[in-house]
Image (cartoon, rainbow, N blue to C red):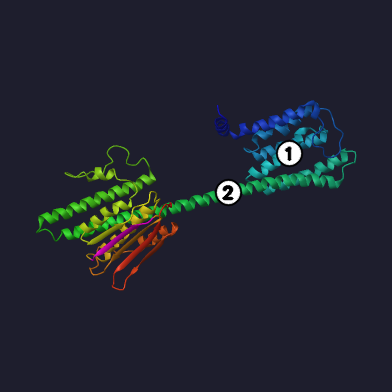
């Protein structure tokens, strides 16, 4: 087994099992002949040889280390009693060194009644110091007892600092996770807005136009076919968004869009790339034309090898601009220009404003605001506003190669 594999197995063990070796190590060290009587000494009592009671003392000082993180209060109480017995009996074992370790652990892991625990330990230390002073030879001064208390208080303070650091890190991670979830929800909301608004607007405009084509069956058939194709394209784009939430979505049988007789649009669109590329802008333009909007499309330059998320953002800019043109200037001539540079993509969509506004939709400005935010994150420029001739122009400069 490799070292990494052994480490994973060790981390999967219960915390009590992982802490037990430390207690056993202290116990073994304490009974070594060369280390007997050379441990912590408070009170200047003469060192006493180990006896039967020493076994209980060592067990109280060492074995509770196994539960120092599972039950820190129990561990602290047992080790403190063992340490007091060790000093009062004069064993002065190396196991007494476990007390500062337990104080650090308790200060780090004890969750409830922390102040009460500190007060109780302080109160208990006073009679212990008095008893050790009376039993000793008088060589221990009050200042030395105070110094030892300060050492123990420092150990508790170190544990409290570790706990505060751990809590602060947990809060930071929770805050980052919450901000990430909020950003992801906002991104999904923008994507849903772009997809649903554009396709539904096109379908509504096409359906309204179909009402006036009852006398022209061929044109009526074309209009209804355009509505059907737009609906299938909307289903495909929505499936792509669902794939972002659940990669297994749509992988099973029977998840196709269900094309009607004589149409294989669903099967064709299921093979389209998940992220719309600038090359699909032409399809977007054709869809808008079928909805009755005259659109001139110009594409210049060659897309760079790596565009990052710039191609998706450029697609969304064109999509939002054409959607607004259908909503508010239906029938107006619209121009779409896409220019590819070495390090950026420039998009300009302008509508001359000579058509009549559609009564099918009421805008909230959310789409343009979302585009401005997304392009700003990439370090680009975005402008949308009315021109002197009453038209509306959207311009975007999108750096290529960045991530969204």
Q: Is residue 335 magenta?
A: yes
In the rendered image, the vertical position of residue 128 relative to residue 371, given as above or below: above
Helix, strand or loop at label 1? It is helix
Question: Foreground residue, 120 or 80?
Answer: 80
Q: Nearer the viewer, mark 1 or mark 2?
A: 2
Q: Does the image show residue 364?
A: no
Q: Is residue 74 magenta?
A: no
- Pinpoint residue 244: horizontal percent, then vertical percent: 38, 46
Question: Which residue is denoted by mark 1 in the rendering?
Answer: 99
Please say if the residues under marks 1 and 2 sit with CB atoms less than 8 Å apart.
no
Q: Residues within 10 Å of mark 2 (few under 14, many from 20)?
A: few
State left or right for residue 370 relative to residue 266: right
Question: Which residue is denoted by mark 2 in the rendering?
Answer: 169
Residue at figure coordinates x 82%, y 45% from the top left: 145
Q: Does the image show residue 20?
A: yes
In the rendered image, the vertical position of residue 184 relative to residue 91, given as above or below: below
Residue at figure coordinates x 39%, y 58% from the top left: 398
What's the magenta bit mostly, secondary-structure-wise?
A: strand
Q: What range of the chain is rendered magenta?
A: 332-341
| Res 357 quadrant in image | bottom left
- Pinpoint residue 157: horizontal percent, then vertical percent: 70, 48
In the rendered image, the vertical position of residue 105 relative to residue 229, given as above or below: above
Helix, strand or loop at label 2? It is helix
């Amino acid at each position: 087994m490799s070292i990494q594999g052994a480490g994973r197995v060790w981390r999967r063990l219960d915390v009590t099992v992982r802490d037990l070796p430390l207690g056993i190590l202290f116990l073994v060290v304490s009974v070594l002949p060369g280390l007997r009587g050379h441990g912590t000494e408070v009170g200047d009592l003469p060192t006493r040889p180990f006896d039967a009671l020493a076994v209980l003392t060592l067990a109280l000082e060492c074995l509770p280390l196994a539960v120092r993180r599972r039950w820190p209060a129990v561990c602290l109480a047992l080790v403190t009693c063992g340490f007091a017995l060790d000093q009062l009996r004069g064993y002065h074992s190396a196991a007494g060194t476990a007390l500062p370790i337990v104080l650090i652990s308790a200060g780090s892991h004890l969750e409830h009644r922390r102040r009460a625990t500190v007060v109780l330990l302080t109160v208990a230390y006073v009679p212990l110091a008095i008893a050790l002073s009376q039993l000793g030879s008088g060589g221990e001064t009050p200042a030395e007892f105070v110094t030892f208390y300060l050492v123990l208080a420092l150990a508790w303070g170190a544990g409290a600092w570790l706990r505060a650091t751990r809590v602060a890190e947990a809060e930071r991670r929770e805050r980052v996770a919450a901000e990430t979830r909020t950003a992801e929800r906002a991104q999904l909301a923008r994507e849903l807005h772009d997809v649903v608004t554009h396709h539904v607007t096109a379908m509504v405009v096409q359906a309204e136009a179909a009402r006036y084509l009852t006398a022209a069956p061929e044109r009526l058939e074309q209009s209804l076919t355009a509505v059907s194709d737009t609906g299938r394209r909307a289903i495909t784009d929505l499936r792509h968004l669902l794939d972002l939430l659940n990669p297994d979505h749509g992988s099973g049988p029977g998840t196709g869009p269900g094309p009607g007789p004589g149409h294989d649009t669903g099967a064709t669109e299921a093979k389209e790339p998940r992220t719309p590329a600038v090359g699909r802008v032409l399809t977007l333009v054709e869809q808008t034309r079928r909805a009755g909007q005259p659109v001139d499309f110009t594409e210049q330059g060659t897309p760079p090898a790596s565009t990052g998320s710039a191609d998706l953002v450029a697609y969304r800019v064109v999509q939002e601009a054409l959607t607004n043109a259908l909503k508010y200037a239906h029938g107006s001539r619209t121009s779409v220009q896409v220019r590819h540079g070495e390090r950026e993509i420039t998009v300009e969509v302008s509508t001359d404003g000579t058509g009549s506004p559609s009564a099918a939709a009421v805008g909230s400005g959310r789409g343009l605001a979302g585009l401005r935010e997304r392009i700003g994150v990439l370090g680009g420029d975005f402008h949308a506003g009315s021109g002197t001739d009453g038209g509306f122009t959207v311009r975007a400069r999108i750096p290529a190669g960045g991530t969204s």
